[in-house]
Image (cartoon, helix red, strand yellow):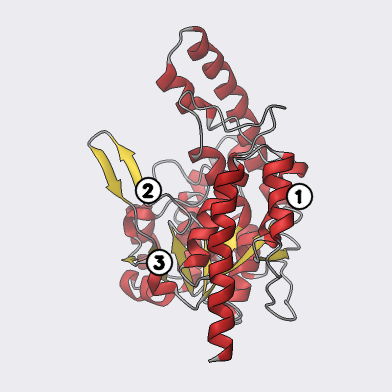
Amino acid sequence: MGLNIKEIIPRKEIELKDLKGKTICVDAFNILYQFLSSIRQRDGTPLMDSKQRVTSHLSGILYRNVAMLSEGIRLVYVFDGKPPELKSKTAAKRRAGRKSAKEKYDKAKQNENIAAMKRYSSQLLRLDDEMIKESKELLEALGIMIVQAPSEGEAEAAHLCKKKEVFAAASQDYDSLLFGAPKLVRNLTLARKRKTYHGYVEVKPELIELEKVLNRLEINLNQLICLGILVGTDYNPKGIPGIGQKTALKLVQGYKKPVLIFKQVEDKIKALPEEQKFDWKEIFELFHKHLVKDVDKIKFPKINEDKIREILVERHEFSEKRVEKQIKRLNKIKEAKKQTTLF
């Protein structure tokens, strides 16, 4: 779901080569769901093996990450731990959304409406424990470090970024900024071209710097968090109806202090349906004091070619030829590292 403040956030387009030599902390769940949503068959169903096990996420992990590693980018994937209780509303909404999408998908399938099937199928997918376990196995086999967060992955990525353990957090969502991540990279793992009604358009990674965001909007981090709560976060998904990004920005710019900001919308919050009501102080505190952990050392595992083959070719029937091609690219990366070390 994520925070929607795209219209007001300044960003800079970059190339993958601009991240060469830098360590990027990836919000794993965000990216894996992106793979499940984007790597699909014509009718919208995910890629699967002969046992009907979903493999879209594994395909994304292999091809997109090898491409980034080939650019000299070092990757750390951080996985969500136990979600805070406040997120239960979001989980309930997602379950309801999946149920509705399933009904619409079945109707589209009955009518042989391929476009509608593709649209609704992306809303049906979810990561189960086995998919998460295999994702971690494959990532480590590719030489990518895994961090298990105690709670929200975005909060942990922001924490590592603030401590300068990594250069930036990577996610499609903007929530990392509310957790105080100094730098956020978007579109990192997207395909380089995206199909639109007018043909294909190039998709480039974007770098968003928190300090520049705050300066451009003429607000501080507390005000940005308030803006997010007004618009809607994972902890109050609907936000306040009628208050969009630009209206929220004017509110936080005008009243500055959180207490004064929410005083202006007190009646609107009270008028919300019971299931949508929220305590802004509780959400505000969660962004400031989220459960995170320190990492002793950023250490990358060795590339394990046999494990890559076992997961993809033997277990899930990936094309051996295509997997070997990616392994060759990994070997080139390994050799380049050896040469650099020797030099």
Find residue 243 and report its horizontal and vertical position in percent: 39, 47
Q: What element carries label 1?
A: helix
Measure the alpha-carbon separation of dots 2 and 3: 32 Å
Residue placed most toward the observer, 91 or 298: 298
Tag in front: 1 or 2: 1
Residue furthest top in the image: 111
* Left or right side of 303 for 199: left
Of the residues under marks 2 and 3, which one precedes in the sequence? 3
Q: Which label was assigned to residue 16?
A: 3
Mark closer to the observer (2, 3): 3
Amino acid type, residue under disc 3 in the picture = Leu
Q: Position of residue 124 (x, y in %)?
A: 59, 29
Q: Which amino acid does label 1 sit on?
A: Lys
Residue at screen point 71% across, 69% down? 292
Identify the residue at image location x=74%, y=40%.
Answer: 315
Q: Which sits in the foreground, 30 or 242?
A: 30
Instruction: Give neighbour class at mark 2: few <14, some 14-19, many 20+ (Cα, 10 Å).
Output: some
Q: How crowded is mark 3: few (under 14 residues within 10 Å), some or many (20 or more)?
A: some
Q: Can you tell which mark lies on residue 244?
A: 2
Q: Where is residue 137 in the image (x, y as percent from the top left)?
A: 74, 55
Q: What residue would you read off at disc 1? A: 133
Whichever of callouts 3 and 1 sits on the residue coming sooner in the sequence is: 3
